[in-house]
Image (cartoon, rainbow, N blue to C red):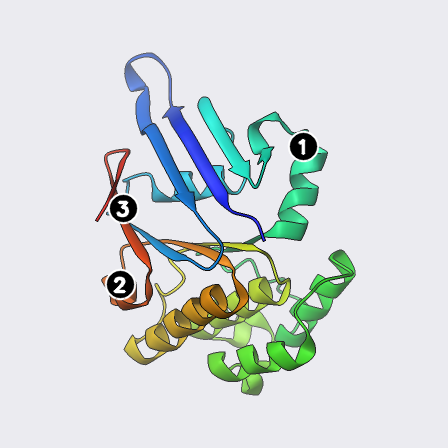
Amino acid sequence: MENITLRNINKYFGQDISRVHVLKDLSFSADPGEMVLILGPSGSGKSTFLTIAGGLQTPDSGSVFIGNEDLTKLSNKKKEELRLNKIGFILQAYNLVPYLTVKQQFDLVDRVKKTANMPREEFNQVIQKLDIGPILNKYPDTLSGGQKQRAAIARSLYANPDIILADEPTASLDAKRVKEVGGLLQDLAHQYQKTIIVVTHDIRLNDFADKIYHLDDGLLHLA
């Protein structure tokens, strides 16, 4: 299993007088078996933090390590391979393929990542906990926001990554579903030694976290 470390990350957007310092000399690490929350208001840099941690964006300075590999020094091809095999994303936009049923979304994972996906018995437990059995044969445009969110969470977990990066995974969920998703992510971290990092403003997840950080105005500190 891999840990994740960010060292002295700086990120800017814009030019000249419009230049904004989004992340300010940010350092962070999380180990296998930990569920970590990054709390902060909209515009605090949470999504930027997450995309840099997953190698989707490059910082202006600093390093991102997955285990001993520095993402900032890898080729695009190597980054894609590492993301495919070690990092799972749960994004606000769901990113479900519109012409595939929920079940077919998982079949697509098998086609893209042919080995080391979650064993069927374990994944059936995920399906049960997320209560998506009744929607397996439905298409995304027939689902509610909460159903889409739970399907997207399941798809990310099915790829069985060492590190799961989640952007507001409970934004569309009611209190009951928040407890189910929070408990599931916590169980995956503790039982299967996953590293789970959730950026959110949803304090309902606090009870499930091993560590809680606050990100505000580009500065990260432990709660």
Q: Amino acid at mark 2?
A: Asn
Mark pair 3, 1: CA separation:
29 Å
Q: Amino acid at mark 3?
A: Ser
Residue 9 image offset from top left, x and y in percent: 40, 28
Residue under label 1: 76
Residue at 27% across, 68% down: 207
Residue at 69% across, 72% down: 104
Q: Quadrant of residue 177?
A: bottom left
Vertical order, 101 against 96 (above or below): below
> Image check: 128 left or right of 170?
right
Q: Amino acid at mark 1?
A: Asn
The single residue placed furthest to the bottom in the displayed view is 134
- Front-lying residue, 105 or 115: 115
Mark pair 3, 2: CA separation:
18 Å
Residue 93 visible: no
Q: Nearer the viewer, mark 3 or mark 2?
A: 2
Residue 160 image offset from top left, x and y in percent: 62, 63
Q: Are marks 3 and 1 in contact (CB under 8 Å)?
A: no
Residue under label 2: 206
Q: Quadrant of residue 81?
A: top right
> Image check: 211 left or right of 76?
left
Tell me which label, 3 or 1, sits earlier in the chain: 3
